Image: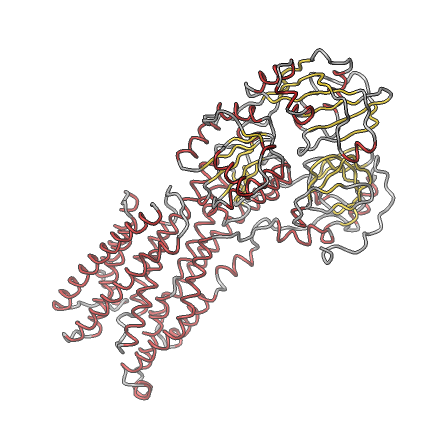
Amino acid sequence: MSELIDSETDAAASVDPDVGLSGADVAERTAAGRTNAFETRTSRSAWSIIRANVFTSFNGIVLGCFAVLLVLGRWQDALFGLIALANSIIGGAQEFRAKRALDRLALLNAPRARVRRDGVEIELPPSEVVIDDVLVLRAGDQIPADALVLRSRGLQVDESLLTGESDAIDKNAGDEVLSGSNVMAGQGEAQVVRVGADAFANRIAAEVKRFSLVASELRSSIDRVLKWVGWGLGPIGLLVLNAQIMVAGGWIEAWDTGGWVQAVVNAVASITAMIPLGLVLMTSIAFAVGAARLARRKVLVNELPAVEGLARVDVVCLDKTGTITQGDIRFDTALPLDAAPPGWEDALAWYGAAPDANATARCLRDPYPVTRELDPTAYVPFSSARKWSAVSFAPHAGTWVLGAPEMVLGDAALDGDGALARLHGELISTGRRTLVLAHTDRSLTPADVDAERLPDGLRAAVIVAFHESVRPDAAQTLAYFAAQGVGIRIISGDHPRTVAAIARRVGVDVEDGFDARGLPDDDDELTAVLERNSVFGRVNPEQKQRMVLALQRAGHTVAMTGDGVNDALAIKTADLGIAMNSGSAATRAVAQLVLLDDRFSHLPGVVAEGRQVIANIERVSMLFLTKTVYATGLAILFGLLVLEFPFLPRQLSITDGLTIGLPAFFLALMPNGQRYVPGFLRRSLSFAIPAGVIIATALTAYTLVARSLGVPQPELRTGSTIILAVVGIWVLTVLSRPITRFKGLVIGAMFIGLVGIYTIPLLTRFFELVDPGETAAYLVALVTVLTIGAIEVVRFFHRRYIARRWNL
């Protein structure tokens, strides 16, 4: 971190934290360009999209082959170059379309900064913050610029997004706070000392917040295949070229007679056939279209490959407040106990009106308005880890503490048969949230405040109850996850019995919740607890993160949803973080997905979209990998046997377009609800390798037999093209099962296209297709039928294999 931050903080002008900058000061700094304006990309840049879709190694190989054929005057055989260009244009256009949607929606998700100017607090975009501005910091805020703390009242900042340190750090006057970090507790004022490109967060924001390629099994598997093919292209290409030259009479004769031209054309055909160009394209398109579809559903995808992560999720951790419930906490009742001292109404009024009051405390403002001003002499702000806050007032002795009953008074106070235990039990059994207002005659000392400890002699004065509205779509959404085999863990900071009561209201079969204060320290024991229980209460932020890590260690792919700043660490740690747009900026900053309209019911659609992407890409990959295998097999066999390659490049364009390219485009975007199971590449290759070997062997056998029967080369090429096209469409049919109406239309259209190519004179002349003759026709029919039969056998055993190994 030392190399990213200046050794000395810029000298700051003297600014009164109660007043802040004046309008004239702001105008002067804005005119001088000393603002926080800094462009951060929320999606891929235009250049990176162009580079990813155009300037690739395989596009370079294809372009080289394309140029060779143009130089040789064989433009008819260079169609694959136009197809590669079209693929790049389509892929780029889809990603640009997704980029526009992401950028537009990201604007709706931009955080706000709170500053004090001319003695008035205002909210404005972070880009309008200027040097020396006074930031007003409260729990849940994301700090927009580097600043020096002027005043601190229990200010705690989480810098994990920047430094990797998960513990919140206490910040006192004179300490520095970094842009991009999040206020976890307390409040304070800080003076901006670095803005724009000089701010710490902006130096690394491109690596933290912008579009990035997250871990993806699809991408890594495809990259592995491309690496294998890349290593084989050179030696196999030379082998084929040498064989074609030998067929033409050897290097000298081929050069003298011009036979080397056809030899080069044949070699180019074998090389280009080996490259699974469309597989990368289809993956990018599927990701981009998935993100665009989710954008229309008001789901912001911060990272496109996160769409794939949706399919892998098998456990969803739900924060209760704001996810299962509406998040609209409302005051229900306040029940004073016999020992309640006078002044408790004023204490509740002060807590409700406090500047750093959280959502629960703010509910006290209407029922308990401030009727007289109280002067706090000592104050311990609320912390989600402690779950209590304490304050002492002058000139009265004593301290008021508001917090969770068991955290303030201990479990023993709730286990007996006293009034507090009875009332508490009745309230939480109905799903209400409870706080206790306790009092002691002792005032908070500076040591108590520094150590954040409760004073002695606390007695319960009032039990305060709140209620939350359950989201109307929560029960249906949880039922969907249960039906899909996705595990649910409901996690909350509330009392376990309260959480369990609400869980039962949304259909979760649970008798009681697990108290997180009893979670074991041992990781293995923690995993066992998480496997046995589904509802957890009294969970602090660090425990949420530990629970996510424990589930991941157990082999689960975990999604975490939440809206509060206390969920940020767990959301960042999860495989897929899902934030509510109404939640804190800290939570939205680390999430891969943001539910822009806060509708929990989007999650089934989100998971379904991810499953559609990965299941369809797996199906499409079998088509492309089968082609790569048989093309590689043909190149090796024909090179070793010194046979003339049985296709022209233009003829391979027929099979590529009708059996793979066009149908793959439609199949990659079709509905598909199959649950994701790891092992994508192995499942694909377990079909593609035997099927590709069979096709390569069949075409080699056809060529050998046809040559022995004296079939001329043009007729032989036509027969090879027919066999490959028909068998390719059959492979498409096999992999498309069960055949729906739409799939039937796609397959039927490919057959019609094939018939058109072989019957329309203009097309037959262009592709150099001729009548194969009676002898060759019988041979073509026999080889085609036998190959289709062998493909059916491969698919039969392939389905049994994946059913036995992956239970699919």
Vertical side of 430 occupied by 602: above or below: below
To which quarter of the image does residue 188 belong? top right
| x and y, in percent, of residue 135 in the image | 77, 40
Viewer-proximal residue, 726 or 315? 315
Vertical side of 24 occupied by 85: above or below: below
Q: How many marks?
A: 0
Is residue 739 shown left or right of residue 527? left
Viewer-proximal residue, 181 or 254? 181
| x and y, in percent, of residue 675 in the image | 39, 43
Viewer-proximal residue, 325 or 112? 325
Write the residue at 17% across / 59% down.
785
To which quarter of the image does residue 777 belong? bottom left
Q: Is there any visible trace of residue 508 in the rendered image?
A: yes
Write the residue at 30% across / 49% down.
736
| x and y, in percent, of residue 159 in the image | 69, 46
Is residue 94 shown left or right of residue 494? left
